[in-house]
Amino acid sequence: MTASVAVLTILDVVKVNVVLTPLEETLQATPTQTGLVVAGYVLAFGIALVPAGRLGDQWNRKAMFMIGLVIFAIASLGSALAPTASLLVIARILQGIAAGILMPQVLGLIQSTFHGQARGQAFGILGAAIGLGTAFGPTVGGLFLGGFGSELGWRWTFGMNVPLVLVVLPLALWLIPAAQPRDGRADLDLVGVVLMAVSVLFVMLPFVLTTGSGDHPIRWAFLGLGTITAVLFVRWENRYRAAGKSPVLDFTLFSFSSYRNGVIITTLWFAAMPAMFLVMTLFNQQGLGHDPVVVGLITVPYAVVSAIVAAVVGKYTFRHATSLIIWGFIIFIAALIGLVAIAVLVPPEHNPLAMAIVLAIAGVGPGFIMAANQMRTLMDVPVTQGGVAGSFQQVGQRLGNAIGIAVGSAIFYALVVAVPRDASGLPDPTDPASVATYAYAFQMAMAVLILFSLVALIFAGIDHRARSKQLVEQAAATVSS
């Protein structure tokens, strides 16, 4: 049940990719407004995560979960019925806040409910759910457009959340336990919450404002402000903890190599994976002229395979998490190289089928990574800090998401900006020069995503060595005792 909610929140990160063009035409949205439909959700999601995780840990996860569900349903309805682009942006920001409230409770509930191998299986199911949400997003949007037409299609893409929440709401009231473990302290650390939120806002803002066309360079000044507020946040948290109080983010969590490396790997993984779907959608839909329904179906094999693999390997993650992560990245990187080769070698009309086949094989990699890294990251974290620890990992996901999409889309759009377009603003998919330019843009964007994945693979290797050393030390301690 909680995994289904995770699917809803992740779906809304990616399913809008294929509905942006009809949405823009229906509401006469400006490029900035269209960008904020995506970026506003991601930004609000990232900002709300840690404060919501903190409240869930210290107050009541079930209550926070119910509040998040209700707000998510209201915001989804507002998005579906929005009469103007501005109101749609506001609704999407509210929806992102709701998603940021929900996700930490999902992670905290798993952390407190399951232990040992059972926790690995639970995170395997969660990994499968997140994989499904990420990969099926474009498919959902494409199917709604194909079934209901341009305007009703994009409105139902947002509105589908409402009946789903109405199903989950009574189940959550019935199944989620009200009692939860606590560490005896109930400090909410409001100053820390504000500093954390402002730091995340300033760091993510320049990336979510990057579109690759006409972006003002002054936006990068926010990174400097984010650095200043982050330093203030760290100093405040350390002093708050030294005073015997409970900070919003206990930096002793980063003394666990599993948590430290896991957050880094998560951030790099989400810089590569969602951006891959975006640039692939842009290449096939705009550059090659394929129908949104066809483009959305490309990811179906990936979604099915990754979900099955994540669910199956969950029971092995407690013992073999670091090895699974390494092999997952090797498979994923090989698949990205395969997608680049398809753009070069395969005729445009056969691109969707060829990419779907490669992504079916690629799904094995994310199936390993999603289940194993979630388990590995929270393996050594105390149960009482499961919500906030999972929240900060999710912040890494949203930050990686923003960086990957910003960099990938900026490279892509910068390289296709000179392509001739018709009155509707679309290129001619029958023009060989236009197709070649779009293929080159796709290749260059994918090269950066491959680089993100390679760096993640390096950190996966570092974490594997740390885990091996830990096991040797534990074995020696057992023998000596």
Image: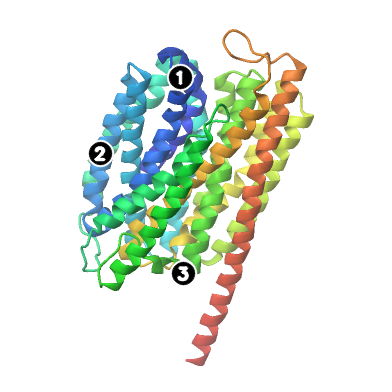
Residue toward you, 396 or 10: 396
Question: Which quadrant of the figure has residue 114?
Answer: bottom left
Left/right of residue 82 with respect to residue 220 in the rendered view: left
What residue do we see at 51% from left, 51% from top? 267
Looking at the image, residue 264 sits to the left or right of residue 96; the answer is right
Which mark is drawn over residue 30? 1
**Which of disc 3 and disc 1 is earlier in sequence?**
1
144 and 405: which one is in front? 405
Tell me the distance, in whole angstroms, between the alpha carbons under discs 2 and 1. Answer: 36 Å
Residue located beneath label 2 in the image: 169
Left or right? Give the position of 163 relative to 28.
Answer: left
Instruction: Estimate the x, y position of residue 28 in percent, counting from the top left.
Output: 43, 14
Q: Is residue 216 among the parts visible in the rendering?
A: yes
| Of pointers 2 and 3, the one earlier in the residue sequence | 2
Residue 126, image x and y in percent? 43, 49
Question: Callout 3: 10 Å neighbours few (<14), some, many (20+)?
Answer: some
Between disc 1 and disc 3, the foreground one is 1
- Can you say whether 272 is above or below 318 in the image? above
Q: Is residue 309 above or below residue 379?
A: above
How many numbered callouts? 3
Mark 2: amino acid: Leu
